[in-house]
Image (spheres, grey):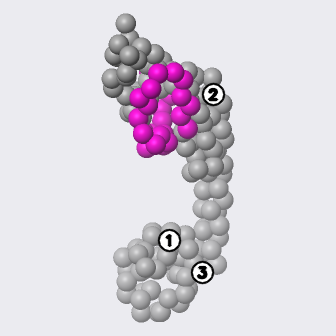
Amino acid sequence: MKVILLKDVKKLGNKDQVLEVSDGYARNYLIKNRLAVAYTKGSEKVLEKQMEVKAQEEEKLKEEAIQLSKQLESIKLEFSLNTGKEGQVFGSISSKQIVESLSKKGIKVDKRKIKMEESICSLGTTKVKVDLYHGLVWGEIKVHVSSKG
């Protein structure tokens, strides 16, 4: 029996996938637990409509990410750290601090999307990459670290 999955099913498939499964498995488990619906012409049309809407939403999210990328290029975040007599830096700037600074400027970015190998622990300007859309759209933030006092 052909079915359309309504949710991800472990070891079977992902949401919106059309699969051929045994009749008993389809009726007694998948359909009964609302994990799938039988594949018919009507359900096929509904699936196509849902896929179109999903594609439009994804395109909109991608466009918003591109706009945010352009906005991030013009931003330069300023931080200051304590330094010793010989220019030794005490402390570092983490992705959490970058996110907090961005939120003060009205930009919301998830901390996990900021790609830094390690915290910034040197004076000067560093460019930090931000994954804005599934690895397809990247933004870049300039982070300037100066000495306190």
The mark found on residue 138 in the picture is: none
Asked whether 116 falls inside the magenta stretch, the response is yes
Q: CA distance from mark 2 to mark 3?
A: 49 Å
Q: How many C-alpha atoms fall within 10 Å of the one at disc 1: few (<14), some, or many (≥20)?
A: some
Q: Is residue 146 above or below residue 17?
A: above
**Label 1, on which residue?**
14
User: What residue span does the magenta drawing correspond to?
Assistant: 103-129
Q: Quadrant of residue 44?
A: bottom right
Q: Quadrant of the C terminus?
A: top left
Asked whether 94 falls inside the magenta stretch, the response is no
The kind of secondary structure element at disc 2 is helix
The kind of secondary structure element at disc 1 is loop
Name which residue lies at 37% across and 21% down.
88
Q: CA distance from mark 1 to mark 2?
A: 37 Å
Q: How many C-alpha atoms fall within 10 Å of the one at disc 3: few (<14), some, or many (≥20)?
A: few
| Observer able to see residue 47 | yes
Q: Position of residue 33 (x, y in %)?
A: 36, 76
Decide which of tag 2 and tag 3 comes sooner along the chain.
Answer: 3
Residue closer to the observer: 137 or 145: 145
The kind of secondary structure element at disc 3 is loop
Q: Is residue 88 above or below residue 141?
A: above
- The nearer-to-camera label among 1 and 2 is 2
Decide which of tag 1 and tag 2 comes sooner along the chain.
Answer: 1
| Observer able to see residue 103 | no
Q: Position of residue 111 (x, y in %)?
A: 42, 39
The mark found on residue 73 in the picture is: 2
The mark found on residue 40 in the picture is: 3
Name which residue lies at 43% across and 19% down.
79
